[in-house]
Amino acid sequence: MSDSAMHHRVVAADADPLDQLRRHLVQLATSADVDALGAAHVIQSLDPSMLFDQFSEYFCIKDRCCRFVFANAAAMSCINARSMSSVLGRTELDFLDRETAEQRLALEQDLMAQGANCEREEMVRLPDGAEKWLLTTRTSLRDAKGDVVGLMVMSRDITRARQEAELERGHAAVLEMVARGRPLPAVLDALCCMIENQLQGIYASVLLLDEAGERLRHGAAPSLPPSYTRLIDGVAIGPSVGSCGTAAWRRCSIVVRDIQSDPLWADFRHLAMPFRLRSCWSTPIMGANNRVLGTFALYSNEVREPTAREIELTAMATDLAGIAIERAMNERRIQHLAYHDPLTGLPNRTLFWAQFARTLMDARRESRKLTVAYLDLDNFKQVNDTHGHAAGDEVLKRIAERIEQRLRPNDLAVRLGGDEFAIVLADVYQDEVSALMRLREIHGAIAEDLRVGTARTSVTCSIGVSFHPQDGDTAEALLAAADRAMYEAKAQGRDALQVIRRVPA
C-alpha cells in the first residue's frame, strides 16, 4: 500500500461513513489507475451490494447524460425501483414527477459542464405523491485526464428534521399568539395549520364545548369543507355521536378507523361520506379541574388508524388548544367583570354610559325616540332585615333576570347600585304608549312572588319615565328626569309608574 493511500485511510478513519466514502470514491475516480471506462467499473469492483447498501443515505453514480450507473438500496427504495437492472441507464424522469426531475437534471448537467460540486437542501416529490426534503451533495467525477465523466450524488433524508424545526417554530408562534391575546379563532386556525403541515392528507378540527356543556360549536377547521363544518356545528354530545361528540361525552380519545361502518357514526355518516371523510380520531381538550373544553380531531380520506406520529401530534395539539381556550375564557371573564355588575351580571355604570351614549347618538341620527326608566325597589331594606343579606342578594339577582327576560336586543339595563336600576327602551317602532305598556309589564313581573331558600317573599318597585327628545337630549338629562319622576311615584304611595311632568313652555 502506498504512503498516500495509507495517509488517506488514517485521515478518513475519524470521519463519518459518508464523508469517508466520499473521499475514497473521489480519490479512486481521479487516481491514475482509473482508465477511460469511467467510474462504473471502479464502483463495481467495490462490491456495492455489501458496501453502499450499508448506508441509510441515498447514494448513486450517474454518467454525463444523468443516467444511473449505480444506486444503493436506499436510493432504489426512495424512487420505488425494484432492482439494479430497473435503474441502470435510466434517468430520474422515469421515477420522479416531471417538474422535479427536470429541475434536478438541469442542475446536474450544469454542474458537470462546469466540473463543479454543490450541497443544498431540496424537496423531492416521490411517485406515491409523498414529499421528502433531502440534503444532497453532488460531486463531479473525473477520469485520469481530468475530464468530467459523471456525477456522484449522496442525499440524506432531512424531512423529519425539517418537520421538527417547523413544528418548534409553529409551537412558539401559537404560544406567542396566545400571549399577545390574539382572537381565539385565529389561534386555533394557526394550531390546525401547524398540525396539517406536519402530516399529509390530514384535516385538523377543533370543536368547543358550549357553556352548558351540552353542544359542540365550531372552533377551527381550515381545511375541512365549510359545508361540512356547518353541518356539525352545534351537535349535541352523547355516547354515540360520531368521534367528537363521543370523545367529549366519554372524556377519552375515540378512534374510528372506518366512518362508513363504525356504529358511533350510524346517525352521522351521511354527513361525512359526501366529502370522502373515511376515518376520524378525536381527543377531548381538557382544562383546569378536569373540565372538558372541546375536542381536537384529525380526519383522513383513508380507512385506517392513526400513526404513532399522529397520536404524538394530537397530544401536543390538545395541550396547546387547552392553553389557548382557557386563556380566552379567562380574558372574557376578566372583561366581563370589568364592565358588569358582579352580583346581577348586568352592565355596570361604565359600560352602561358608553352604551347609552351610542344608543342616543343613533337615535339622534335616525330621528327616533328613546324611553328611559329609573327603577327603585320599594322597602327593600325589609327583605335584608327579615331574611338576611344573602337572601337580599338573591332577590336582586332574580329581579335582574326578570328585567333582562323582557328586554329586546337593542334595549339596555343597568344596576346603578343598591336596589336601583335603569332601563333604556330603544325599539325603533315603539311610541310612548307601547313603551309604557312594556314598562308596566316589567313592573308587574318584579312584583311576582319570589322563593328564596324555603321562604317566600315579594317586592314592588317605583318607576320613573322620561322620553327622548322631549325630556332631554343627553343621557344625563334623561336619566335625571326619570329619577325625578321615580320620586314622584314614591311620593304617591310607591308601587307605581310615573312619567316625568313637563312644564308648559
Image (cartoon, rainbow, N blue to C red):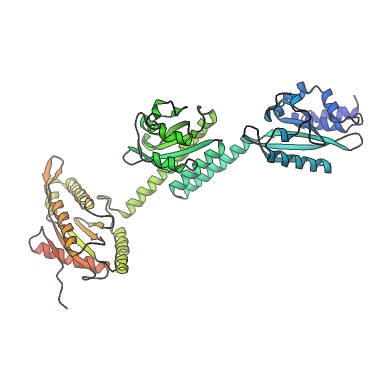
Q: Is residue 66 left or right of residue 97?
A: right
Name the outermost residue toward the left: 493
The image quadrant where one finds the C terminus is: bottom left
Report x, y in % for residue 225: 47, 41
- 217, above or below 366, in the image: above
Report x, y in % for residue 475: 27, 66
In the depicted view, which residue is nearer to us: 438 or 57?
438
Q: Is residue 225 left or right of residue 240?
A: right
Name the outermost residue toward the bottom: 505
Q: Is residue 190 left or right of residue 401?
A: right
- 329, above or below 364, in the image: above
Quadrant for residue 15, please give it: top right
The image quadrant where one finds the N terminus is: top right
Report x, y in % for residue 189: 48, 44
Is residue 126 visible in the rendered structure shown here?
Answer: yes
Is residue 118 visible in the rendered structure shown here?
Answer: no
In the depicted view, which residue is nearer to us: 49 or 313?
49
Q: How many marks?
A: 0
- 485, above or below 159, in the image: below
Report x, y in % for residue 155: 72, 34
Please tell me which residue is depicted at 42% across the width and 43% down the height of the picture.
Answer: 219
